[in-house]
Image (spheres, helix red, strand yellow):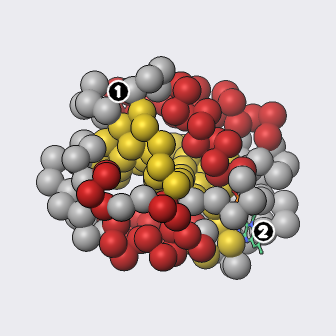
């Protein structure tokens, strides 16, 4: 498999820790970058890219990703695939759960194939723009209330990505 770039933005460290778990699950096949200090030249040669973000405001993109997204969207995505995971808090922000993934998705889905979509099964929340016809546009995770489910969700997702990143 071609090497993977994991691009994460974090406000309090949770996305970073999840991004490192994703990197470990790819067993040496993934490099990891904080979007706060990455340059496009470092990442534009990767065929497969994983975006990791958290949700802030009401359904908004994490601050560092907000700054980086306009440049990211200008990459030449020919031949590439992108997967997205987003952290959220399904209890306190039940009507905008993990919506940050939709902000990224809307910006890139007409330019690149987005993989790593998962069925809306096993999540408890009221509403999210990131679900279309019962399918999330990426992987939602809730480190605030469901941290005990994160590992199994990631294992399953990475198995899925290993099949889709071809
Ligand atoms: C000010 C603020 C606004 C938030 N808004 C949302 C939201 O709209 N939807 C959601 O699912 N989670 C929301 N969250 C929860 C965070 O996305 C969640 O705690 C995440 O794990 C933070 O990850 P990070 O510390 O790596 O940035 C919000 C958290 C804060 C502090």
Determine the CA span between mark 1 and mark 2: 32 Å
Q: Nearer the viewer, residue 118 or 55?
A: 55
Mark 1 residue element: helix
Residue 163's label in the rendered image is 1
Residue at x-position 60% and y-position 73%: 63
Residue that lies at the very extreme toward the top in this rendered image: 27
Residue at x-position 77% and y-position 48%: 143
Q: Is residue 117 visible?
A: no
**Residue 4: where, in percent of width, then height?**
36, 37
**Residue 120: where, in percent of width, then height?**
60, 48
Q: Is residue 18 left or right of residue 139?
A: right
Q: Is residue 76 above or below residue 59?
A: above
Residue 93's label in the rendered image is 2
Q: Which of marks 2 and 1 precedes in the sequence?
A: 2
Q: Is residue 96 above or below residue 150?
A: below
**Residue 58: where, in percent of width, then height?**
69, 78
Q: Nearer the viewer, residue 23 or 139?
A: 23
């Amino acid at each position: 498999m071609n090497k993977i770039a994991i691009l994460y933005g974090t406000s309090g460290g949770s996305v970073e820790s999840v991004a490192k778990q994703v990197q470990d699950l790819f067993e040496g096949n993934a490099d990891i970058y904080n979007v706060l200090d990455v340059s496009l030249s470092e990442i534009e040669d990767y065929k497969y890219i994983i975006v990791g973000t958290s949700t802030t405001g009401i359904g908004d993109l994490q601050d560092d990703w907000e700054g980086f997204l306009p440049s990211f969207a200008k990459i030449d995505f020919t031949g590439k695939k992108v997967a997205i995971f987003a952290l959220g808090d399904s209890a306190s922000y039940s009507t905008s759960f993990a919506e940050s993934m939709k902000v990224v998705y809307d910006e890139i889905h007409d330019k690149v194939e987005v993989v790593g979509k998962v069925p809306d099964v096993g999540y408890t929340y009221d509403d999210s723009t990131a679900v279309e016809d019962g399918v999330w546009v990426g992987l939602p995770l809730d480190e605030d209330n469901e941290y005990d489910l994160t590992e199994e969700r990631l294992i399953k997702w990475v198995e899925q990505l290993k099949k889709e990143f071809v």
